[in-house]
Amino acid sequence: MDAGATILFTLRENYLTRTVMGPEGGEYFHGIKYHIGLGYLTFAILTIHSFYLGGVELWNAGGDIWLAFNPTAGYTGHVNFWGILAWCFLAVMVVTSLWAVRRWNYRVFYWAHQFYILFLFAAAVHWQTAIYPIVGALLFFTYDRLVPYLNFKRGVVGKVTRVAEEIIRVDVPLQRAVNMEYAPGDWINLRIPHVNVVSFHPYSIGSFYRTTPSHATVFVKARGSWTY
């Protein structure tokens, strides 16, 4: 269950947590801290589970590691092998998510986090019923990631201006400005080709809707140790 909750807190627009925690509770920047905490908690629980039961199975096998963890040696070896493999995938994700690693090389963290697919697969093979509490969260997560790509028709041509050596200003035209209210400090998910061709990122808005009703302005720092 905690693994499912960990996934839910990565959603950009988390309406479930917003209902429980209020308007700000469903925003990505408020929910990601719970994702981090639950991720470490999940890893701690699975580490205790893996080493305790792994030790028991190794004891039952008379100390024969090959017999205890060989997937071709029988059902017990199969379960143990895939369980340890799932733990290894999760360990890679946790180690590369540490603050020092993210600051050192964000791409290492980003690509290592894609191991969640392998982790979930190995966990499902290890113990089939373990995947059921996560299915709902996975569906929400898939929906959250697919919707922006299904709405590519909403693309607009923005005006990009360099205001400093490492900062660019992007003026984004708003087609439905009369129905939108925003102020400096609010954020919006955008796909800016100059930054990344396929990925959407949340950017802080630097303009007020009454002052510039036809467009919103965001400032993007092109490089630096600015990731969360």
Image (tube, rainbow, N blue to C red):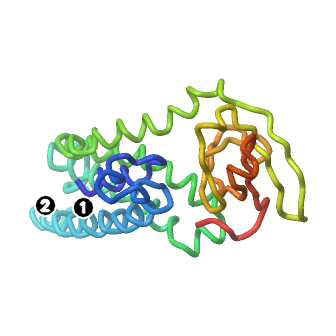
Position of residue 199 in the picture relative to residue 96 (left or right): right
Position of residue 219 in the picture relative to residue 66 (left or right): right
Residue extending furthest top?
153
Q: Which disc is residue 65 wearing?
A: 1
Q: Looking at the picture, how far across and down is residue 186, in whole percent?
A: 60, 57
Which residue does the numbered mark 2 point to in the structure image? 61
Q: Residue at x 65, y 28 (%)?
A: 154
Amino acid type shown at disc 1: Ile
Which quarter of the picture shows residue 218?
bottom right
Position of residue 171 in the picture relative to residue 187 (left or right): right
Q: Residue at x 13, y 61 (%)?
A: 61
Residue extending furthest bottom?
100
Q: Looking at the picture, how far across and down is residue 140, in whole percent?
A: 37, 39
Residue extending furthest left?
60
Q: Circle 1: is it few (<14), some (14-19), or many (20+) Cα within 10 Å?
A: some
Q: Looking at the picture, how far across and down is residue 43, in whole percent?
A: 32, 65
